[in-house]
Image: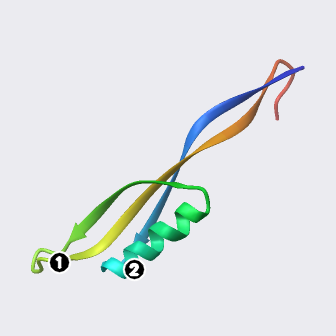
Amino acid sequence: MAERLRKYLEYKIVETSAVHDLGLEAIVNEWVKKGWQYDGMQFAMHPSSRRPTMAFVLFTREAVEEEHEGGDEA
């Protein structure tokens, strides 16, 4: 049975209601130290407020998975 490695992009999404500079900075620094690459940020707004109520911080990293060729897979 032959094996090969398959590379793919893995995603991490961190949700927070602490939408201020220090809170967002802490999230980015924490996950970058863990090997994730910062990919972007999305904000959720409340209609009656000019400030976001939530943020979603997006990260990616390259991952590797072994693929088994041939044989029976369970």
Label 2: which secondary element? helix
Q: Is residue 18 visible?
A: no
Type of amino acid under label 1: Arg
The structure's colour scheme is: rainbow
Q: Is residue 25 visible?
A: yes
Residue occupying image coordinates x 26% and y 65%? 43
For the C terminus, the image quarter is top right
Tell me: residue 18, above or below residue 35.
Answer: below
Left or right of 63 on screen, residue 5: right
- Give how far apart the Cα atoms at labels 2 and 1 are: 15 Å
Left or right of 35 on screen, residue 25: left
For the N terminus, the image quarter is top right
Tell me the mark number nearer the camera, choosing from 2 and 1.
2
The residue that mark 2 highlights is 23
Q: Residues within 10 Å of mark 2 (few under 14, many from 20)?
A: few
Label 1: which secondary element? loop
Q: Position of residue 24 (x, y in %)?
A: 38, 73
Q: Quadrant of residue 51?
A: bottom left
Tell me: residue 14, above or below residue 6.
Answer: below
Left or right of 52 on screen, residue 8: right
Q: Position of residue 10 (x, y in %)?
A: 56, 46
Residue occupying image coordinates x 9% and y 80%? 48
The residue that mark 1 highlights is 51
Residue occupying image coordinates x 55% and y 55%? 36
Could you say which is closer to the camera, residue 74 or residue 43? 43
Could you say which is closer to the camera, residue 39 or residue 51? 39
Type of amino acid under label 2: Gly
Tell me: residue 46, above or below residue 9.
Answer: below
Tell me: residue 47, above or below residue 41.
Answer: below
Q: Earlier in the sequence, mark 2 or mark 1?
A: 2
Q: Quadrant of residue 55?
A: bottom left
